[in-house]
Amino acid sequence: MYELLAVATITLLAVVGPGPDFALVTRNGYGFGRKIALISALGIAVGVQVHVLYTVFGLAILITQSPGVFWLMKGAGALYVMYLGYRTFHNAAGLTVGEVTGNTPSAWQAFGMGFLTNALNPKTMLFVVATFTQCVQPNAPLWLNLAYGLLMSLLHWVWFSIVALAFSTMHLRTLLLARQGILDRGIGAALFGLGASLLFANAVS
């Protein structure tokens, strides 16, 4: 019970903080509507399992102790965050409430955006590794560790579904879309800056 509460508490504290996953769901919510945002939230939750699986099966030791592999993981994640920021900043497709355009992502594209945002996020990697290291006993059975991993994904899915519902409501979405250019540039700049800072920190470490 102590381990369960510890995993749940740490996950909730980490997931509500602003980051690329929050920016992605927010942007997809006001830009493309509830369905796309909810599918992106599901992709984020599934992306957590990438880190859970290699952590549970012992690959986390290799990644944290091998500078080359760790650098590649961080570099790929940072570059992808920068790419998302660039695309959002330079988004020129203006949308209106209820409008469906060719620029609207498909369900698979929305899922993929969410999945890759977390699967390539080095902060999610470090969070999962740190949580299992601090809260889960090394001799715990495999099924229990996998269950903790599923709890992490479940909490991610619940939180980002709430974010998706909030930012895709008609009233709030109308207000946000009226300022879409400013919001896209703000979120895009924040994502690009976050990715650049991660890449820089990786280069000097």
Image (cartoon, rainbow, N blue to C red):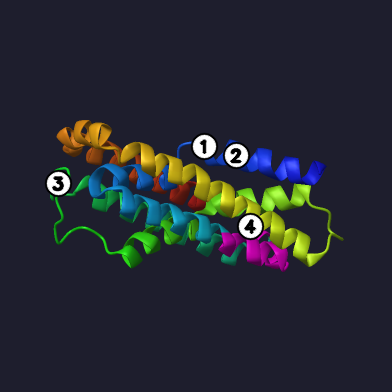
Give the Cα distance between marks 2 and 3.
33 Å
Q: Nearer the viewer, mark 4 or mark 1?
A: 4
Q: Amino acid at mark 3?
A: Leu
Which residue is painted at 39% across and 57% down in the image? 39
Looking at the image, residue 53 sits to the left or right of residue 25; the answer is right
| Chain-order first, disc 4 or disc 2 | 2
The image quadrant that residue 96 belongs to is: top left
Q: Amino acid at mark 2?
A: Leu
Residue that label 2 marks:
12
| Chain-order first, disc 2 or disc 3 | 2
Give the Cα distance between marks 3 and 1.
28 Å
- Residue 150's disc is 4
Region rendered in magenta = 49-64
Which residue is painted at 44% across and 51% down in the image? 199
Q: Does the segment drawn in magenta span residue 106?
A: no
Residue that label 1 marks:
16
Q: Are marks 1 and 2 in contact (CB under 8 Å)?
A: yes
The residue at the far right in this view is 139
